[in-house]
Amino acid sequence: MTGIRSKKSLGQHFLVSERIVNSIVELISATPEQAIVEIGPGQGALTWPLSKIGAKLIAVEFDRQLAAQLNREFEKNSNVTILNQDFLKFEPESKNLDKFILCGNLPYNISSPVIDWTVKNRNKVTKAVFMLQKEVALRLTSTAGSKQWSPLAIFTQLYYETKLRFTVSPENFEPLPDVDSAVVTLDIKKEPEIKNAVKFEQLVRKSFKQRRKLLSNNLIPDIIPDSKTAARIFMELKFGPKVRAEEIESSKFLELTEKLVSLKIL
Ligand code: SAM
């Protein structure tokens, strides 16, 4: 595609490596019976090989010029629909989509909202394949006990198995991004039973409010009234008194939520 300048504000770093494109399409591994939604098709680097699978493909591009160009290029492909809109406002129901695979070389400024969108639409998104900023990919796929363990990983991994597949260096894009990238996959898991999901989320966010602080200091007094109560609850749950949020697994956060709810503290 020529004559269109890339827009930094829309995170436009186009993939120019056929090898990386092929590896991503392989991970998406769709069949003609499935449906695919692509976020930010740009100049069509992924859209073209995906269109050849024969699956229903909806590509959502915010940039009016790029969307118009893609619409012309895919005019004759009846399985491909190009939508010119903000992906974050995309409603799968509007296109009669039931289950689908979500993918994209994401504009990095919307990666976290896209991951939130995915989790919210988990009844439809069976699998996702995203190119992300490497730092976000490491956070998303981290485990408890690591510096990257975060609310993003906790909320996503409750519902999806997340895997970092490979890293991608800047020279695979045009124009060059300032950071390394990585491709991650999210595969839907059996929905866990969470009795107090809203309170759980509130507790996790507060726990990580100031990462360097002890868990107790993040929770007192906003959630747990005083240090005596915190010490008693932590002892019952076998949390060390010096524990920090980044050391706590999701199942332990769930236990803490239940405990606090049962004591009518949360
Ligand atoms: N898929 C192409 C590729 O790999 O070469 C382009 C990837 S580029 C990193 C991100 C694309 O997302 C750009 O085309 C940009 O215009 C588009 N974009 C940015 N914000 C968007 C949004 N909110 N909704 C949909 N597309 C968006």
Image (spheres, helix red, strand yellow):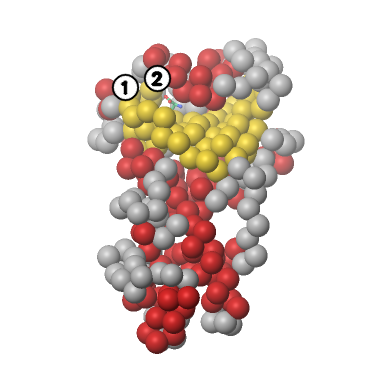
User: Is residue 162 visible in this depiction of the protein?
Assistant: yes
| Quadrant position of residue 118 | top right
For mark 2, give the secondary structure.
helix
| Quadrant position of residue 19 | top left
Position of 236 relative to 92 (above/below): below
Q: Is residue 215 left or right of residue 194?
A: left
Q: Amino acid at mark 1?
A: Asn
Residue occupied by mark 2:
20
Residue placed furthest toward the right: 96
Pinpoint residue 155: horizontal percent, then vertical percent: 51, 53
Q: Nearer the viewer, residue 24 or 54?
A: 24
Label 1 lies in ligand 1 vicinity (Cβ under 8 Å) = no
Query: Marks 2 and 1: CB-CB under 8 Å?
Result: yes
Which badge, 2 or 1, comes first in the chain's sequence?
2
User: Is residue 70 visible in this depiction of the protein?
Assistant: no
Disc tally is: 2
Pinpoint residue 20: horizontal percent, then vertical percent: 39, 19
Position of 120 relative to 256 (above/below): above
Q: Nearer the viewer, residue 130 or 225?
A: 225
Residue at image position (55%, 74%) is 259
Q: Is residue 134 left or right of residue 118?
A: left
Looking at the rendered image, the disc whose residue lies closer to the viewer, 2 or 1, is 2
Residue occupied by mark 1:
172
Give the Cα separation between the discs numbered 2 and 1.
Answer: 8 Å
Give the position of the N terminus as an image quadrant.
top left
Q: Amino acid at mark 2?
A: Ile
Pinpoint residue 183: horizontal percent, then vertical percent: 41, 31
